[in-house]
Amino acid sequence: MKTSSLLLSTLQASFAFLNFSYLQKWTIFGIIIGVIAGLAAVGLSLLTSFLTGLFLGIGAGFIPPSPGVQQVAYSLAIERPWMLPIIAGAGGLAVGLLFYKFAPKTEGHGTDAVIDAFHNKEGNIRARAPVLTGITSSVTLGSGGSGGMEGPMSQIAAGLSSVIARIFKFDADDRRIAIAAGLAAGIGSIFKVPLGAALFSTEVFYRRDFEVKVIVPSVIASVVGYTVFGFVFGFAPIFSISPDSAKYSRPESLVLYAVIGIISAAASMAYVRMFYFVSKAFANLKRVPVYIKPAIGGAMVGSIAIIAPQILGNGYGWLQLAMLGSPLLLPIWIILIVAALKIVATSLTIGSGGSAGLFAPSMVIGGLLGTFIGELFHIFGLFLWIDVSATAIVGMVAFFSATAKTPISTIVMGSELTGGYGLLAPMMIATVIAYAASSLNSSIFKSQVITRRDSPAHKEEYDISILRDLKARDAASPQFVSMSGISPITEVLDIMKSNGVGFVFVDDGRDTTHANGGKVRMALLHDVVSAQDTGRSILAAVSNKESPVIKDSDSLYDAFSLLMSTGSEVVAVSREGRIVGVISYKEIAKAYHYNVHSKTRK
């Protein structure tokens, strides 16, 4: 304990200059986050490869193909296919037990957990989450679970960034920036997409908005993480394609790419529905222990893999083979079946509680779908000048854009993943169509919100919007006095003092909603005291001020506007022609404060 305290004190003393400018601060911490994320990505990749070779290679006698190499002649041979359900089920059981024992809320796809921490947890991610996620995701993928490393890697890097932010006592806003930078560094390194990952961290928190303030830390952290990872594994893109195939030369090609965009939108919505249907089905298995559910999902995936081993792991190698026109994926109906089974397998793996990401499967499903569409058009003699690898790339990008609601970053990622910058225009068309045609609510990331206004992280920036959402009855105070105009001054003064109010409304029996053009007469305490001193006898003689009136169903913003425009100290709140409460600036401030902080705590 003393050693850790000493280390913490040393770190804090070493960075005592944290009050430096934004750029200086986030350059330093962007580099730190990037180095840590890059090293974590190296470790996760090596561990996953080792476990894949151990479980699938030695256990079942099957090694999935790898992307980035020309391997059209890959041989699909499984020595012990009957072992696949056993291996995948055992892997799921191990993951379930780890979650059950150490962190039951860490299971699932990591990117969504980071989004939730950004919006609802002030950038806080538990310190044990990165380590546990690294182990469980490697076991899940190594034993054949359908998923990717990008989601877990984003949670690992963001979790470590959150720990760093807490060590240096960052406030909530800076903790959010730190985990966004960690997310970018994690994806940028493991996926080799530094620019796309930096843009992704600005897009992924919203379905129709951007988090612009994280762009500088995200760029720095992503580039550094990518550099560390690339130094170990090389900087070549994940997928290998022929330079001649990734080009756009004829404008009529856009018709085919538009079709890919439309079909990708429909398929992405089916994917999201399938995933959450399966997740709900497993959640409803109340009598099944939580640690058993990933084992059931894993065994089901392994059973499917006996007839379709293409669903195992991240599937990048099979997408690579599809781009190269491998005979293992022909006739073309096999491609469509594999894409559909990949949706089912991913839903079973992660929906049952396995630890993996939805990023990679989405790319693979979209790429296979694009391959199928390209091959289908070729069968009918259409668009023969377009290489199938081009439709695979465009399908991959369009499908993920619709699934994750991140069109801009996905376009950039498509270029970085393949080096296919010649397909920029087709990717733009297909991606925008897929994004726009898919439902706003159909996102694989359930923690996304629509815009910044909908995020508790930014609620205080939208005070006018909050006031428009609240009603006058939500803030009206019952502490007021309403008396007849013929009431004696001495009686009025006694009642005001006993009720602790500084004003009194004059009740003349008329409908206060319409009286005096929407105003009621009132008298302040000092006016009543002065009237008593000067010998005036009734309340009507001193009520020389007016208060605006608002219905209890009107918005609090309307009350605020009336206070501002009239200069009145209070607004009378009426219901059915009678005053039922009052609103001052104090009531508005209390209602606003309660609304903001109650939603932040949820």
Image (cartoon, helix red, strand yellow):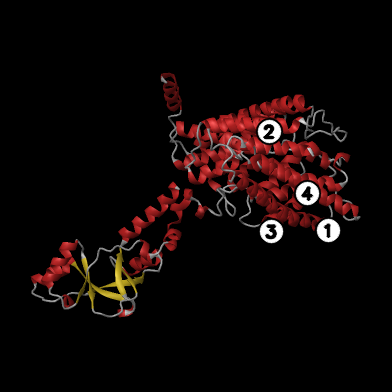
Mark 3–mark 4 Cα distance, whole angstroms, equals 17 Å
Kindly indicate the quadrant of the structure image that contains residue 495. bottom left
Query: Residue drawn 68% across and 52% down?
Result: 402
Tag 3–tag 4 contact (CB < 8 Å): no
In the rendered image, the residue lying farthest to the front is 287
Q: Nearer the viewer, mark 2 or mark 4?
A: 2
* Dots 2, 1 in contact, CB < 8 A: no
Confirm whether residue 369 shows in the render.
yes
The reply to whether dot 1 and dot 3 touch (C-beta < 8 Å) is: no
Residue 225 lies in what quarter of the image? Answer: top right
Mark 2: give few (<14), some (14-19) or many (20+) Cα within 10 Å: many
Q: Amino acid at mark 1?
A: Glu
Tell me the distance, in whole angstroms, between the alpha carbons under discs 2 and 4.
28 Å
Query: Dot 1 corresponds to which residue?
Result: 252
Q: Secondary structure at mark 4?
A: helix
Residue 592: x %, y % from top left:
38, 56
Q: Position of residue 380 (x, y in %)?
A: 90, 55
- As drawn, the label of residue 437 is 3
Tags 2 and 4 touching, CB below 8 Å: no
Mark 4 vs mark 1: in front: 4
Task: Give the distance between the C-alpha atoms of the residues marked 4 and 1, in whole angstroms.
Answer: 21 Å
Q: On the image, numbered disc 4 is attached to which residue?
A: 369
Q: Is residue 35 above or below residue 205?
A: above
Label 2 or label 1, whichever comes before in sequence order: 2
**Residue at point 34% right, 55% down?**
590
Sequence-first tag of 1 and 3 = 1
Amino acid at dot 2: Gly
